[in-house]
Image (cartoon, rainbow, N blue to C red):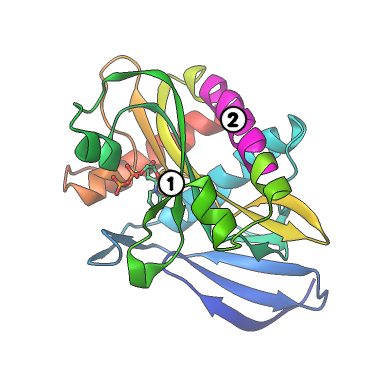
Amino acid sequence: MKKLQQLYEGKAKKVFETDDPDLLIVAYKDDATAFNGQKKGQIADKGVVNNIMSNIIFKIIEDAGVPTHLVRQISDRETLVKRVRILPLEVIIRNVAAGSFSKRYGVEEGSGLARTVLEFSYKNDDLGDPLINDDHILALELSTEEELALVKEYAFKVNEVMKKFFLERGLKLIDFKIEFGIHKGELILADEISPDTCRLWDCETNEKMDKDRFRRDLGNVEETYQAVLARVRG
Ligand code: UDP
């Protein structure tokens, strides 16, 4: 597989074309941003952790029946993926109150919820990724009704698979964000699943083992990313 010209550079990844028009190479960077790009930094070897971890989790999700963009890992930082048209939605699942949910609704972080919450943000940096509902999504034609129904079904399935996977490794899955895309007419899971996109708390100590260590200046950022990868590798 030949790596051709760079197609795009995002906050955490670069994307390259390949000699196959249906496949792209994603290259994970160590750059970290938070609060819609207002806070910037570097986390040494984050790109390696996120690439390897994301691929391990995408593989178990795929095995559980949710199609993903994963083709194969190429190197520590690079993965071959299916090219998609990304839906401009951040799909967020919450098992426990934290982050913006706690802030918005005035509930303490760590509070239990009477049910699993699925919410959407409209992926639009200029607008600050605003919260959006089903009617808004359909009115703005960000997805079709069929896609929206399947996105929800897949998101809950991903949650069940990941909750179990992390629990077996001593981590509570508090919440996470995923993204979907369309590849050859099929809805598939895309982007990444990593400590950048999940909240993971140690089952015994409740220690935060995710990007909140960077967002909130909690220290031991690099060490925590490595520790999560070690647990994920089992
Ligand atoms: N998240 C993400 N990218 C975003 C916003 C959120 O990956 O642009 C993840 C975040 O890491 C957390 C979950 O989605 O696991 C819920 O985030 P929340 O809405 O609480 O936002 P935050 O408090 O991170 O601003």
What is the span of residues highlighted in magenta in the rendered image?
150-165
User: Residue at coordinates 49% horizontally, 54% vertically from top-left?
Assistant: 136
Query: On the rendered image, what quadrant is the C terminus found in?
Result: top right
Residue 179, percent from left and from top: 56, 51
User: How would you rate the neighbour count of disc 2 (Cα within 10 Å): few for under 14, some for 14-19, many for 20 or more?
Assistant: some
Q: Is mark 1 within 8 Å of ligand 1?
A: yes
Any part of residue 34 in sight: yes
148 left or right, relative to 19: left
Q: CA distance from mark 1 to mark 2?
A: 16 Å
User: Residue at coordinates 18% horizontally, 32% vertically from top-left?
Assistant: 106
Q: Which amino acid, by three-letter code, is at mark 1? A: Thr
Residue 15, percent from left and from top: 59, 72
Examine the structure image and report whether residue 193 is included in the region drawn in magenta: no
Which residue occupies the foreground of this view, 117 or 220? 117
Residue 51, percent from left and from top: 55, 52
User: How would you rate the neighbour count of disc 1 (Cα within 10 Å): few for under 14, some for 14-19, many for 20 or more?
Assistant: some
- Give the structural element (helix, strand or loop) at label 2: helix
Q: Which amino acid, by three-letter code, is at mark 2? A: Phe
Query: On the rendered image, what quadrant is the N terminus found in?
Result: bottom right
* Mark whose residue sits in front, 1 or 2: 2
Tag 1 residue: 197
Residue 202, percent from left and from top: 33, 23
User: Residue at coordinates 38% horizontally, 60% vertically from top-left?
Assistant: 129
- Give the structural element (helix, strand or loop) at label 1: loop
17 over 113 or under it: above or below: below
Tag 2 residue: 156
User: Residue at coordinates 34% horizontally, 40% vertically from top-left?
Assistant: 210
Q: Is mark 2 within 8 Å of ligand 1?
A: no
Which quadrant of the structure image shows residue 103? top left
